[in-house]
Every structure is written in C-alpha cells, then in structure tokens.
Image (spheres, rainbow, N blue to C red):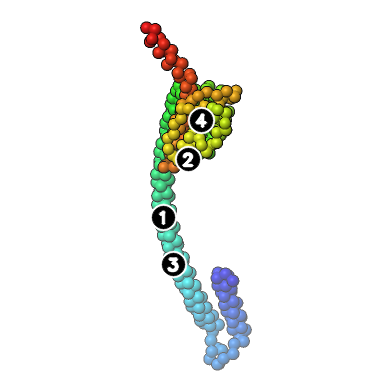
Amino acid sequence: MPEHIRFIGQLAILFIVTAILLLLMDRQMLVGPEDLAQWPFAVLSLVVLAALFGFVAYLTNGRIAELTAARSHLEQQLVEINQELTQTRNDLEERVERRTFEISVANASLNREIAERIQAENETRQIKRQMELILESAGEGIFGLDVEGNVTFVNKAASQMLGWEPEDLVGQAHHAIIHHTRADGLPYPVSDCPIHQAYRDGKIHFGDDEVFWKRDGSNFQVEYISTPILENRRLTGAVVVFRDLAAFRKPLTHNLQEGGVA
C-alpha cells in the first residue's frame, strides 16, 4: 500500500475514534470515578483534542522526518547518478575523440598507401609499356617461358619469323610447337633441349646449329640464347632471344660483295 494512503487511513481512524469518544461523553456514557464523570464536557473535549493534536503532530512530524530522509537519500542518489553520468559522458567523449583521432590517422595512412599504390601501378604500367615497346622494336625474336616450358609472351619479330600470332603461342608448350624436330628430321626430345635446361638448371644456354619450325611446317636455322629468370633466388622461367641466321647472313653477304666491288 502506498505511504500517503496508509497515512490518510491512520488519520481517518484516529478522528473516527475521537468522534465516538466525544459522542459517548456527550451522553454521559463514560465509565470512571465520580469526580471524573462530573467534569465539564468542554474540558474533556479540550483534553481529548489536545491529545489528538499531539498525537497527530507526532505522526506528522515522524512522517515528515521520514519523507525528508527519503528525499535526502534520493537527492544523494541523484547527485551520485549525475556524477556517474558526467564521468561516463566525459569518458565517452574522450573515447570518441581518441577513436576519431585513430580513425583520422588510419584514414591518412590508408590514403597515403592508396596514393603510393596508384603511383606504383602507374609506374609499373609505364615500365611495362616501355618494355613492350622495347620488345616490339627489337629486331631479334624474343619469347618468355614459365617453368613448365609454356610460352608467356612473344614479341612481334618472333611471331613474324615463326608465322604464328602471339595469342596463338601464349600458353602453349614451345618445344612441341617450334623445337620438336632436329634439322635432319629426327625427333628432338625435350630433355635434350638447351632451352628447356635453362629454366631447369638456372644456367645460360646457347645454340647456333639448330632449327625452329614455322606454322606452315617449314624451318629455319637459328642462333639463340636461353637465359633463366630468377625471382627471389627462385627459377620462374626463361627468356629466349633468337634470330634467323639465313636472314642475318644475307645482308652481311651483300655488304661484303659491295665492299669487294668497290
């Protein structure tokens, strides 16, 4: 039951009892000594009302004291809660500021990393483009191989000499396409191929008495050098540079003849 309702109920009971006592005294129904029974009704009423006032004042004072104590306790709790809220807010603001700073630092670092990566990619593209231009402008045939002997790239001169489009050679086993047979028509085992050995033993291999085979089935004598590719001290393939000896010797013979005529 709520405190205020219980307090009102106590006062109501008290006043009802007082009213009944006054009614009984008014009808001379009080039981007691003769001198008390002869007291004037007004004096008895004042005494009863004074007692009632004192009792009500006592109850009221106790209730007010309880309410005051409860109020003080609630105010103290409110002060503590406000202090906790203030501390929590300060801690939260400090965490937010620290986290915001950390995010700003991380964002700046990320932006710098992105910028560096974009710059590195642009530089890589430029280097790749320059390498492509160098490969395309080279007079010798150049093609790359992985550790399985498959073609990874072919320059323009190589594709023209071999009669293949670059995209048709990339991904194919070079030995099976252009180096499968010796000049005398005998099969050329891949295990004997110096080009194959370059990306196996990591050594540079030369050749000037062999032939490469074209797409149309014809062949031409070549001079080549097979150089292994090392990446972090690990063999990742080889680069083969070759030239058609017949085509190379024609200009040389022509120059010698012109020199002799002069």
- Residue displayed at 59% across by 76% down: 13
- Residue displayed at 54% across by 30% down: 182
**Mark 4 lies on residue:** 153
Q: Measure the alpha-carbon separation of dots 4 and 3.
A: 88 Å
Mark 1: amino acid: Asp
- Residue displayed at 48% across by 25% down: 222
* Residue 113 quadrant: top left
Q: Nearer the viewer, residue 90 or 155?
A: 155
Decide if residue 110 is in sight here.
no
Q: Position of residue 145 (x, y in %)?
A: 50, 34
Q: Is residue 78 above or below residue 132?
A: below
Q: Measure the alpha-carbon separation of dots 2 and 1.
A: 65 Å
Secondary structure type for disc 4:
strand
Considering only order in the chain, which callout, 4 or 2, is on the residue closer to the N terminus? Answer: 4
**Mark 3 lies on residue:** 72
Q: Nearer the viewer, residue 257 or 160?
A: 257
Q: Measure the alpha-carbon separation of dots 4 and 1.
A: 61 Å
- Residue 200's disc is 2
Decide if residue 211 is in sight here.
yes
Q: Measure the alpha-carbon separation of dots 2 and 3.
A: 91 Å
Q: Is residue 129 above or below residue 108?
A: above
